[in-house]
Image: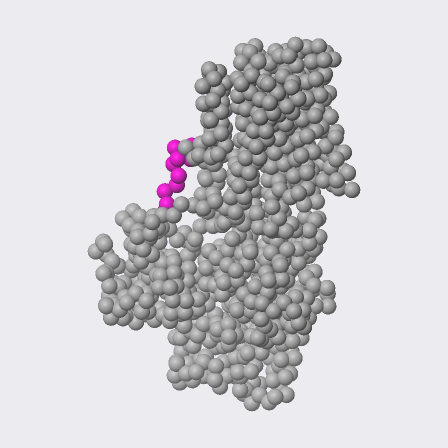
Amino acid sequence: MPPLIPDTPHAKPVEELTARMSVSPERGLSAEEAARRQKVYGPNHLRQRKPRNLLSILLAQFQSVVVYLLAAAAALALAMGDLPEALAILVVLLINGLIGFLTEAQATRSMEALRRLAETRCRVRRGGQDQMIAAQDLVPGDIVVLEAGDVVTADLRLIRCAGMQADESILTGEAVPVDKDSAPVPADTDLAERRSMAWKGTAITRGTGEGLVIGTGMETEIGRISRLVQEAQPEATPLEARLDRLGQKLVWLMLALAGVTILAGLLRGHPLGEIVQTGVALAIAAVPEGLPVVATLCLARGMWRMARRNAVINRLSSVETLGATTLILTDKTGTLTENRMTVVRYLTEDGAHTIPPGTVAPPAPGSALELAMRIGALCNSADIAEHAETVPTGDPMEVALLSMAQRAGLAQGPDGPVTEHAFDPERMMMTHVHAEGAGFLYAVKGAPEAVIAAAEQELTPEGPRPLSPEVRADWRSRAQAMASEGLRCLALAMKHDPLPDAAPYAGLTLVALVALADPLRADIPDAIAACHRAGIRVIMLTGDHAATATRIASDAGIGDGETVALTGKDLAGFDPAQLDGPEAKRVGQSAVFARITPETKLALVRFFQNAGHVVAMTGDGVNDAPALRKADIGIAMGQRGTEVAREAADVVLRDDSFATIIAAVREGRIIFDNIRKFVVYLMSCNISEVLVVGLAVGAGLPAPLLPLQILFLNLVTDIFPAFALGLSRGDASVLERAPRDPAEPIMRRADWRRVIVLGGAITLATIAAFLLALRHLALPPHQAVTVAFLTLALAQLWNVFNARAPGRRALRDGDIDNPYVWGAIALCLLLIAGAVLIPGLATLLQLPYPGHTGVLLALGMSLVPLIFGAAYLVRAHD
């Protein structure tokens, strides 16, 4: 380890460490020194699994049942002396592998780019200014500023702590948060007991503090562990696994049909060589070459479209689950509201003080209003820099209180707090202790009910006065009235004490209530209405006052307008496994939950999952992480969310907007619809090829298709139109229908019926065209084969418009305006025409030109499946 970093930093005094690392805790490193150390120590990230190189991606394209079957067909053709056919099969294998290689390579690059969108950032002090930087830019000697909800991004020697606790289970396996302190500990202290350290990858669950970076990247504790961990191979997502199983089942089904056909041909006395050639053709026809390639492209494309709508997907399987969401549990602040708080009113014992916009006249010195503004500024961890172009940092509510004091000309004070008691979710209060005169001022803020209950007296113009039960009730009533207006309400209290470490919540004097406005986002009512039309229920979970939550929910359109919020107290003893009884009914019917704890959030997620819902849960705090992990879809806020929440989530909203969730759900539904469409398309095309050859041979007719022709068709019609269907933008009604059952397979019974009907229609049209060419037009057998080839090829192209679900109008399922569909059709038409008109290619494929009459016959018969399929889909819907 470089000599700049000591061997036992946990045992060294802070002063010795900062001197050795040449850094001032008040100013941090300079930008120039940080850049120099970056060159010496490198970026602060763990050694990641090497991305798959291009050769391994290419080789992976040839490791499947599909490829093995085609290779066997090529070997069989070669054994029969048919060198052109064997070479053609190998060429198709190479082309198909190249398409898959390019697609997977692009998808891999896309996933890496998406991960960079959700890059971890941290707050660091450099040049005397606190700023947000990418965590990978941290260097030894940096001063990192920590608060509850942060993920520690390097190994730190703590130099200041205020009520700090950390979850170190990632290193120690101990789930109970560990208290932290800046005092050194003995050198031989076990890692789990080193209270003066914060480790990379752990999470700050409570309090605030600052730490000196003493280890980055692989020189951290988690870096040392990662060296010992053998890299695991990436697992296929559930959707990819289901598609793979589906493809394998299809192969074996088609091979069974091929076996029956070959047996029938032998029984009818066909020559062995001809039957072997037929078997090769059927084996080729059975292979769904495009299935894995198109699925990869569809998922990668959908993830990029979600990213452009500000929804970054952390887990690929979430793409599938999003479309099945039936219930969204959403928080209020910043998701439904703008998270742009402003102080609008103070309530003191002598009346209400409305705050106008703009500059505020300084309050009378020594008045309750002046003291209330001071408490709001002193009990505060936000930072508003002097420069207007610098964005304030900290909780929006605290930024609003600090800004209010500055607008009124009140300074926060030259020195920070002597002691901090961080916000406690159970107490619902926080305290900052400041030196004042010969003693100390305890500035307290918190939930009105908590502060009013803790206070022993109130501040009046004549001085402090004991709080009687009647006065307490009056204060609660005033807080309730402001909350019912949709305002965020806090209580402010204080006390003086000669000691800095007295009980922070004993002997308090209630000074004022302060009301803050956080307006509803303008797009929320429409987004909630869109959820309802999509069959998705929306429930609000918030730690805010019940009256405030009820008003915001009503304005947003959540509930029936008469919803009464259930509070955490109402849910005391609630059992999420109990789905029957009056309590379960009351919980199940409620749309607003207020003043709830993280434990209650987790219980509600479990309850609604047990009730059969696919639950999406939004969250931003470290305490939301358990519920985010438990939910089917955890959705974290990208702007105000903590690193813990973002790492626990499946989806990160870069704009913190609820409307983005609806956009992501829409994309999830479109992706699944597209996958189902191209699977139906591919299967109906493949089954038609098998049936055309099989029925003709079984009926004693000449083979209407040859192996090379089937290979050419599969390369053309299996890939390009399926690609285009996978890129469909979806129909306008995708959010107008109920969510699908998450247990629903990709191919339902109705989809299998569609495959059989559409494949059967293409089969009958092709065989009919073949027979008409032979008997009615009296074409030679080779030209009749060309008619069958053209009929099948064109019918499969038009089949893209019948791959839609029943009930969707023809050419209106998002494909008529899909440029990829028309581009694929145009390309395929050129390739099909080339197969017949280009002499060398026509000779290789044995496709002599059948004359204008034969071409018109093929074109006319190819339209029959399109018309029949459209009529069937309408009838199936009715």
Nearest to the observer: residue 399 or residue 320: 320
Q: Is residue 711 visible?
A: no
Q: Residue at x 59, y 29 (%)?
A: 260
Nearest to the observer: residue 641 or residue 612: 612
Q: Along the horizontal axis of the image, is 693 left or right of 630?
A: right
Which residue ends up furthest to the left in the rendered image?
A: 3
- Image position of 302 with respect to 534: above or below: above
Residue 601 placement: quadrant: bottom right
Q: Residue at x 26, y 69 (%)?
A: 189
Q: Residue at x 39, y 83 (%)?
A: 499
Nearest to the observer: residue 12 or residue 803: 803
Q: Along the horizontal axis of the image, is 819 left or right of 75?
A: right
- Image position of 761 with respect to 453: above or below: above
Q: Residue at x 53, y 13 (%)?
A: 844
Q: Which residues are magenta?
A: 48-58
Q: Look at the image and tell me in which quarter the N terminus lies.
A: bottom left
Q: Position of residue 741 (x, y in %)?
A: 63, 51
Is residue 54 covered in magenta?
yes
